[in-house]
Amino acid sequence: MTQSQIAPAKPAKPHLPDAQTVTSVQHWTDRLFSFRVTRPQSLRFRSGEFVMIGLMGDNGKPLLRAYSIASPNWDEELEFYSIKVPDGPLTRKLQHITTGDEIILRPKPVGTLVHDALLPGKRVWFLATGTGIAPFASLMRDPETYEKYDQVIMMHTCRTADELEYGRKLVEDLKNDELIGEMVEGKLLYYPTTTREETARMGRITENLKTGKVFEDLGIPPMNQGEDRAMVCGSLDFNIDVKAVLESFGLREGANSEPREYVVEKAFVGDGI
């Protein structure tokens, strides 16, 4: 074969900075998807923390957003749960990733939805709307959660039933989990509700707490400062409304530097991702 007959080599696809490889993608609805990526060997994180992930923007610079790590700290891969925003600078691209693609992942985890930010208690409440369930997907799969609390209550509210499917399947699978299935049994109480579609359980988290309906449905006493702890993740309006409800029960907001009865993740309050 002569030199002129040798086909020119295709240029290698440029690697992204801080690149991790997508190992699986699942689309739950036309608005929601989850994906898993390889985990940097050096990455250590506390369940409930978030990292910055993204892709290259149209201007050739990294386009990054804060995403909670939905997998627990013992997992060999990292899982993320995302909304699809049609005009979102990042998610309009991110929603099209497939197995084998690369994403940018800055391996510096931070966040307030961690056990260290709460004082010891008897019950812990995970309060989330939409993709705000992601940090609790991590915490619900962490053995430490069940070692610290007698009861773990996951309240998750979405507009429609199909938007609850990610959380529902996760909770269902936990019962058969080889690592913590026995720990979860009898401790994890799942309370999903919808706000638009007619389902068996409806209503906003704030209303179900204020009216006492959730306590009645689950057969547990109302929140009190001595026994109950809470973590909150949702929109800015949701966070503000829930804080007022929690404080009406006597709970005080804490932080990593000053543990108290509840904490709120403030990294995800912006829209248009």
Image (cartoon, helix red, strand yellow):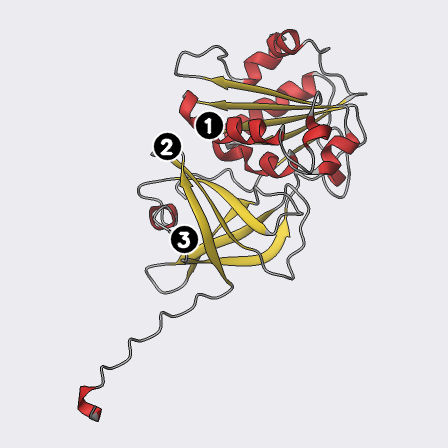
The answer to whether residue 220 is left or right of residue 191 is right
Residue 252 figure quarter: top right
The residue drawn where x is 56% and y is 41% is 70
Residue that label 1 marks? 165
- Where, quadrant-wise, is the N terminus in this rendering? bottom left
The percent position of residue 98, horizontal first and vertical second, equals: 38, 51
The residue drawn where x is 48% and y is 10% is 200
CA separation in Å, label 1 and label 3: 22 Å
Is the Cβ of the residue at disc 2 closer than 8 Å to that at disc 1? yes
- Where, quadrant-wise, is the C terminus in this rendering? top left
Q: Amino acid at mark 3?
A: Thr
CA separation in Å, label 3 and label 2: 18 Å
The local secondary structure at tag 1 comes to helix
Residue that label 2 marks? 29
The local secondary structure at tag 2 comes to loop
Q: Amino acid at mark 1?
A: Glu
The percent position of residue 244, horizontal first and vertical second, equals: 62, 21
Residue that label 3 marks? 99
Q: Amino acid at mark 2?
A: Thr
Pick out the residue farthest to the front: 1
The answer to whether residue 265 is left or right of residue 163 is right
N-terminal-most mark, 2 or 1: 2
Is the Cβ of the residue at disc 3 closer than 8 Å to that at disc 2? no
